[in-house]
Image (cartoon, helix red, strand yellow):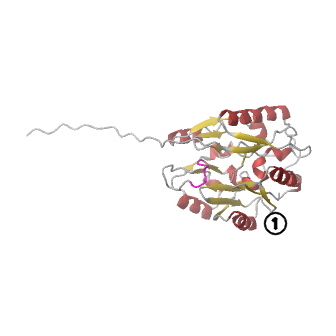
Amino acid sequence: MTTPATSTVPVTTEAPVRTAHRRRYLMCKPEHFTVSYTINPWMEPANPTNTAKAVAQWQELYDLYQKLGHEVELIEPLPGFPDMVYTANGGFVIGGRAYVPRFRFEQRGGEAPAFADWFRSHGFDTVEPREVNEGEGDFLLVGDVILAGTGFRSTGDSHREVGEVFGREVVSLNLVDPRFYHLDTAIAVLDPVEGVAQGGPEHATIAYLPHAFDEPSRRILHERFPDAILASEADGEVFGMNAASDGYNVIISPRATGFAQQLRERGYNPIGVDLSELLLGGGGIKCCTLELRGA
């Protein structure tokens, strides 16, 4: 009897095909950037800052967005408010409605009226808050659901309020590491188009830093996003999760090398932009980027 020859056929797993979607962003040039007070663990007034370097790094991000075909609006920077460059904290926008912030710390309180005025003058249905919230820093839209962070800045009552303002399901997540004091420092939304089905053809809707959350929040994230990218602590420490994605291109810290490889394996195109000077104020790429979702 002749034994049939056997052969091993290599199995290849192709990454999903990702699609870039044109986005509209609000940014603020860091003309007055410095670190003169401490409201997060990254800020140390004794360490010198370089405003010109901050502007140059910010400009690289601004230019990249335009090169990728995105629309970028600008809000005028105000003297005395160096954190205004972190426009993600300036509101949360869905369907042409803008829910404006109420900052926890008085050092940033004067930013809120400026953002509210900008939204009104640009035709947004502008909603003033009753509760402490810091905009898209703590509110992230994933599909049709709002992920909402608490623990350091936005309060739990703001989670109820944001749900009422937009008529959406809100999932509360508790942050426990003070270095990751806003939700957008611990979660990156990789498929930013509203309505993308969780568990659909684009499996990895988010990436997140597990140790930034308490155990109940980790369970929620695992149950809702079983295919999410789990980032390493090393990538989290360089603000790798503070990223902006158009569904294909993901703008990240160039030092988040492990995260970049994870993105490539999932079919995304990571692009590194160095905002190391702005990290001295506790902000990164997503912090400098507020998404303006139209009607």
Figure check: 108 above or below 275: below
Q: Is 273 drawn above or below residue 114 in the view shown? A: above
Tag count in the figure? 1
Residue identifier under label 1: 130
Label 1 packing within 10 angstroms: few (<14), some (14-19), many (20+):
few
Residue 175 appears in which quarter of the rendering? bottom right
Residue 95 is covered by the magenta coloring: no
Residue 47 occupies quadrant: top right
Image quadrant holding the C terminus, namely: bottom right
Q: Is residue 49 left or right of residue 171?
A: right
Looking at the image, which residue is at 63% across and 35% down?
271
**Which amino acid type corresponds to the residue marked 1 in the rendered image?**
Arg
- Residue positioned most to the left: 1
User: For residue 193: magenta?
Assistant: yes
Q: Is residue 71 visible?
A: yes
Q: Which residues are magenta?
A: 190-195
Q: Residue at x 58, y 62 (%)?
A: 220
Label the magenta part by its dominant secondary structure. Answer: loop
- Outermost residue on the right side: it is 80
- Quadrant location, the N terminus: top left
Q: Residue 93 in the image: state x and y as whole percent.
A: 72, 54
Quarter location, residue 221: bottom right
Image x and y of residue 58, in percent: 76, 36
Q: Position of residue 203 (x, y in %)?
A: 50, 50
Q: The residue tagged with tag 1: helix, strand or loop? A: loop
Left or right? Give the position of 213 relative to 29: left
Picture residue at 16% right of the left edge, 39% below the top:
4
Residue 177 visible to the viewer: no
| Left or right: where 241 falls relative to 224 | right
Residue 76 image offset from top left, x and y in percent: 86, 42
